């Protein structure tokens, strides 16, 4: 595996080594020692899997007092995955990075604790999986509004194609949480 880039300190884009032949392929999605070597030292405590249809935008989520690091990837389909640095003492506070993750490129994004995270489905449907470094705590959950003009995230799809949960429609702006 290789770290393709670190667009914001701590945020990693990882390309696992894929072994392909006429039967199909094999790749490791997590191996503690190898991931420790590239800087992911947290213990993962929970795995999640979501399936969504085209246009669904989930996020931008974070936990306030019990932040989660996430190792994310796509098992089927295509998503545009986004992480926003909300670490108040960070020189990159408010910066975001987006990466297309697909079942063909097999890229992973490591989103460290202290980032808001979300994704938008670009294909007809997508299966999105992620490991978390902390347990989900509904009472600690928060988010950023997906279309915050201060962030100016280009979600690739037209605004009319975006499908949000009622909860995500009410998320605050970055200025409101700062």
Image: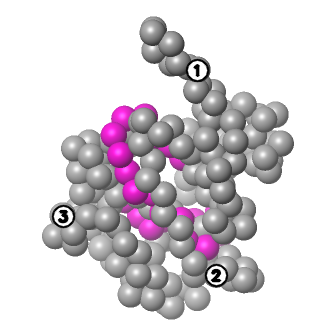
Mark 2 residue crowding within 10 angstroms, few (<14) / some (14–19) / many (20+) = some
Foreground residue among 27 and 139: 27
- Residue behind mark 2: 93
Reading the chain from its start, which is encountered first: label 2 or label 1? 1
Q: Residue furthest top?
A: 23
Q: Main secondary structure of the magenta part?
A: strand
Pair 1/3: label in front: 1
| Residue interval drawn in magenta | 58-85
Tell me what residue is drawn at x 64 percent, y 81 percent.
93
- Is residue 73 rendered magenta in the image? yes
Where residue 104 sits: x, y (%)? 42, 35
Find numbered disc 1 in the image and state the secondary structure of the residue it sits on.
Answer: strand
- Residue behind mark 1: 19
Display colour scheme = one colour
Image quadrant where one finds the C terminus: bottom right
Q: Is residue 52 above or below residue 57?
A: above
């Amino acid at each position: 595996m290789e770290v393709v880039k670190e667009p914001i300190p701590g945020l990693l884009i990882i390309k696992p080594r894929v072994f392909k032949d006429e039967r199909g392929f094999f790749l490791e999605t997590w191996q503690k020692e190898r991931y420790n070597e590239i800087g992911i030292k947290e213990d993962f405590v929970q795995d999640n899997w979501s399936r969504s249809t085209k246009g669904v935008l989930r996020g931008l989520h974070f936990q306030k007092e019990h932040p989660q690091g996430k190792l994310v990837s796509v098992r089927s389909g295509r998503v545009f995955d986004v992480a926003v640095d909300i670490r108040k003492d960070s020189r990159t506070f408010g910066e975001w990075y987006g990466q297309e993750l697909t079942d063909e490129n097999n890229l992973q994004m490591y989103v460290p604790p202290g980032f808001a995270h979300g994704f938008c489905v670009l294909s007809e449907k997508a299966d999105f999986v992620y490991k978390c470094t902390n347990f989900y705590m509904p009472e600690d959950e928060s988010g950023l509004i997906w279309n915050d003009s201060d962030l100016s995230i280009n979600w690739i799809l037209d605004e009319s194609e975006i499908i949000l949960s009622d909860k995500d429609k009410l998320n605050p702006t970055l200025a409101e949480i700062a």
